[in-house]
Image (cartoon, grey):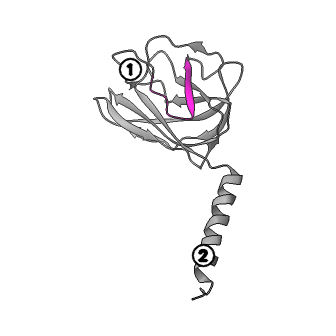
Amino acid sequence: LNRSSDLEAIGLHTSSDTVAFTSLDGYFESLFGSHTLTGGIYSNNGGQPGSLLVAFTPVTVNSSTPTDYTLLATSAYNLQANTEYWFVLMEPPTSLYWQRDTGNTAPTPAPGYTFNGYMQTANSGSTWSTDTSGNWTVQIEVTPVPEPASALLTGMGAVGLLVCRRLPRKR
């Protein structure tokens, strides 16, 4: 985040599997006092953020040096397979900064998604533009969501093992 924008967004595209959102980690600094960082996961609307799907729990940034902060969703949220999402961060137009990657390298995607670019807006999301000022130091964590059939098969196997252990053995 910087003074020229009040919202910044990271786009990502999920792979062929549904994954559970775990956290978004980033380096932030506050030049004057403490500031509250909020945001959430948004749908994709024509290549830019659309509707809010789940909010992040607000985080207070109070360090004048880049410090790692973790953003969590206010409730459990699964990112559906083959879908584009936007992770939007917002704060009042003050002096909160998101640390840029000095090597200007794109964040390393985790298994389950690929990065799809950066956007910014200075008018609370009325219009978005591509942010080309460098890559942000950020990591989005996700965990695999087991398919219902796999979970059922695993459960049936566990029940079968228990039944086999309880049956009397012939000598």
Mark identifier at residue 36: none
Q: Would you identify the image quadrant in which residue 2 lies?
A: top left
**Which residue bears the numbered disc 2?**
162
The residue mark sitting in front, 2 or 1, is 2
Q: Would you identify the image quadrant in which residue 1 lies?
A: top left
User: Rounded to the nearest whole Å, what is the CA distance between mark 2 and mark 1?
Assistant: 54 Å
Measuring from the top left, give residue 102's x and y in whole percent.
Answer: 33, 17
Identify which residue, 157 or 36, lies in the foreground. 157
As helix, strand or loop, the secondary structure at mark 1 comes to loop
Numbered-mark total: 2
In this rendering, does residue 33 appear at all?
Answer: no
Tell me: residue 115, above or below residue 38.
above
In this rendering, does residue 161 appear at all?
Answer: yes
Q: Residue at x 39, y 38 (%)?
A: 69
Mark identifier at residue 100: 1
Identify which residue, 143 or 39, lies in the foreground. 143
Task: Name the amino acid type tagged 1.
Answer: Arg
Q: Earlier in the sequence, mark 2 or mark 1?
A: 1
Q: Residue at x 58, y 27 (%)?
A: 12
Say whether marks 2 and 1 touch (CB < 8 Å): no
Measuring from the top left, give residue 33's x and y in whole percent.
Answer: 33, 33
What is the span of residues highlighted in magenta in the rendered image?
A: 107-119
Residue 112 located within the stretch drawn in magenta: yes
Task: Name the amino acid type tagged 2.
Answer: Leu
As helix, strand or loop, the secondary structure at mark 2 comes to helix
Tell me: residue 128, above or below residue 139.
above
